[in-house]
Amino acid sequence: MSSVAQQSAVAPARAQRAETAPHGRYALPKGALLVAPAAIFLLACFVVPIAQMVGYSLTAHMDQGIAVPGLTTENYARLFRSNLYWVVLTRTLRIAAITSVICIPIAYPLAYVMARGSAFWSRLVMFTVISPLLVLVVVRAYGWKLILAKQGFLSWLLQNLGIAQAPPTLLYTEWAVIIASAHVFLPFLVLPVASAIGKIDLGVEDAARTLGADWRAVFWRVTVPLSLPGLAVGVTLVFSLTAASYVTPQILGGNFAAMLGTLVQQQVLSVNDWPFGAALATVLLIVTLVVNLVMLRLFERRFARWAGRGEAR
Amino acid sequence: MNMIAPGSHRMAAVALGLSALSKTYGAAAVVDGVDLNVEPGQLISLLGPSGCGKTTTLRMIAGLITPTAGAIHFGDRNVTGIPVHHRNVGVLFQNYALFPHMTVAGNVAFGLEMRSRDRRRNRALVDDALAMVQLTRFADRYPHELSGGQQQRVALARALAIEPQILLLDEPFAALDRKLREEMQIQIKDLQRRIGITTVMVTHDQEEALTMSDQIAVMNNGRIEQYAAPGEVYDRPATRFVAQFIGVSNLFEGEVAERRQHDSVVRTASGVLMTARETGNRARVTLCLRPEAIRIAPAAVGAEPGVDSALGTVSRIVQRGSITEYHLRLACGDTLIACRPSGESDGLTVGLRVIASWASERIHLLV
Ligand SMILES: Nc1ncnc2c1ncn2[C@@H]1O[C@H](COP(=O)(O)OP(=O)(O)O)[C@@H](O)[C@H]1O
Ligand SMILES: [Mg+2]
């Protein structure tokens, strides 16, 4: 072979314009079928019991626990008359809020490493963060009890570091509940934030750097804002889970940091006043729901437009 | 650091200089000793097939990748060790990499805010930048509310608003459809010339490189095979790779049959005789002949090919818009590609016996 005519090997791969299939158009019947089992499950195991609970809260009761026919708002009236319930309600919300806020700065570095680190670090962080969920809640709470006790590890550490003079009171305070809740509910914040960070186009961060942003500016102006959808989901989860938790506050908070869940348990099991317990549970449900909706709404307002939601192109 | 490439005797100022720039990953040299000088205000292209190291080179210039060896100069300043956010380069990324959570104005303002807190001045500069790319009306839109071409203009405004020393473009037109691509090529070239910014563009599209660049660096396997003006690269490719990469090319290998004072006659293995400007003492040479340099005419019965001509049969006719390609099967079985403006077919049809000929000065000798 000596005289060869050659065609250049270059047939530039022009933009691959992937035709986006119009999922939405055919999605309805098929989607409805797919959703049906979950919908039925939720209806049977969630909506019906809640309706039942709300119903209970509107019935009267006699001292022996026998229900009286007819509807009444007495349970709610009683709830708002007593200062105790108001104190417990605000404490529940406070503990849930502080736990959520404390989780945020702890979650971000972890989520960042999980999303951006090498496979080894990513898995290590994932396992570390999830590990508290693998331990039985009672065992975990007693573990924290040992650490937080007057003669416990944390007390010893604080005294030896000279931060505290006398053995500090940690156990049976709100802080004990907050620390333990943050520990166990952290994964519910880390995972959605990591997923959100993982979705950020690295090119966008590169672009910020070429425009003069150092790593701090990149983090605050690009990474954090773009991970807000994940943060919103995570904070909502941590808040709700903490507000509704029962075992942890019972063991670590005792009567000094009783939360709404504890009161519900007392009414139902000790006092045998089911309607009043149901009223407390309903209030907890409504308050948590409202707080979450307000929070999501605030986040949504911030990122609805750039995320392309709720607005036609 | 030697800033002047070997063999350049002009004392041209250098806006961007790469010397022995290399990047290796493990054992693989992705960029392998690249030397390159760009004069101020020029637009040069890094042209080569996918995976040859163009993007890696560009990212090293930007500071997004640390070179394994070699140096990068912006003018007299050695920037090799300067981190990306202090380099003052404007980069137009392939997918634009706009900030999805910021408006068009917010995107353009970002780089300015990193430099100065003077809001009034920044806003004026944003307005200027948006006016430059005719996007003033879209200042409050979010990126996903814009078309591809508009997004690219935002990215360009954002990159230029910081008044960078060097502009870097990575496959800037790959995501646009043909019509828009040609429009944006013209717009960006005009803009680049108007503000006179030194620009490095990465592309795998030889046409794009030929139309837009002042100089083209053809890359292969992490090395620059030729660095020259588009016409030079096209007419006188330095290597076999360049000849093949820049469009359709007829390549011949042959032995020197007869040495003359100013040239020699080369006989290819298939027996075609060609004039070559070979005056050295090489016995085997490679010749390159552009399709448009070949004339074809129906062969007379009993025609005999002489030097710089060959007999063959038209085996295929390919319409390529403004030009038509004729594939000729030569007597020895090899194929020769010729082309001429469409509409000048002169009755050439498939199966016709033709004689192909060319002027000896159109034959390019590869070194
Ligand atoms: N981080 C990396 N690790 C290992 N190999 C890499 C890395 N980045 C790029 N490469 C390799 O380097 C080569 C050149 O890549 P690139 O510069 O992107 O090519 P081009 O832009 O010319 O298509 C490719 O073969 C690619 O696989
Ligand atoms: Mg590339």
Image (tube, coloured by chain):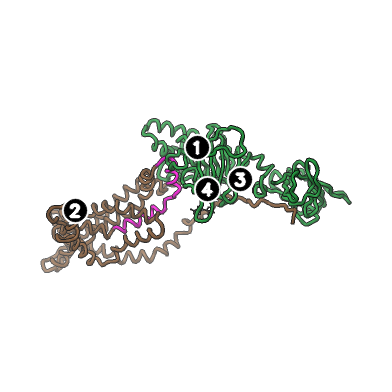
| Kind of residue at disc 3 | Val
Q: Which residues are magenta?
A: A186-213
A193 or B332: nearer the viewer:
B332
Instruction: Tell me the element at label 1.
Output: strand
Is residue B115 in sight in this rendering? yes
Instruction: Tell me the element at label 3.
Output: strand
Q: CA distance from mark 2 to mark 3?
A: 65 Å
Task: Report the residue marked by disc 1.
Answer: B74
Category of crowding for the residue at label 3, using alpha-carbon neighbours closer than 10 angstroms: few (below 14), some (14–19), many (at least 20): many
Where residue A285 sits: x, y (%)? 24, 58
Foreground disc of the pair 1, 4: 4
Task: Report the residue marked by disc 4.
Answer: B22
- State which chain disc 4 sits on: B
Residue found at the very far left of the displayed protein? A63
Task: Name the mark on residue B99.
Answer: none
Where residue B359 sits: x, y (%)? 78, 42
Task: Name the mark on residue B218.
Answer: 3
Residue at left 81%, top 55%?
Answer: B331
Instruction: Tell me the element at label 2.
Output: loop
- Look at the image and give the colour of chain B: green
Q: Closer to the N terminus: mark 3 or mark 1?
A: 1
A213 or B187: nearer the viewer:
A213
Foreground disc of the pair 4, 3: 4
Task: Report the residue marked by disc 2.
Answer: A161
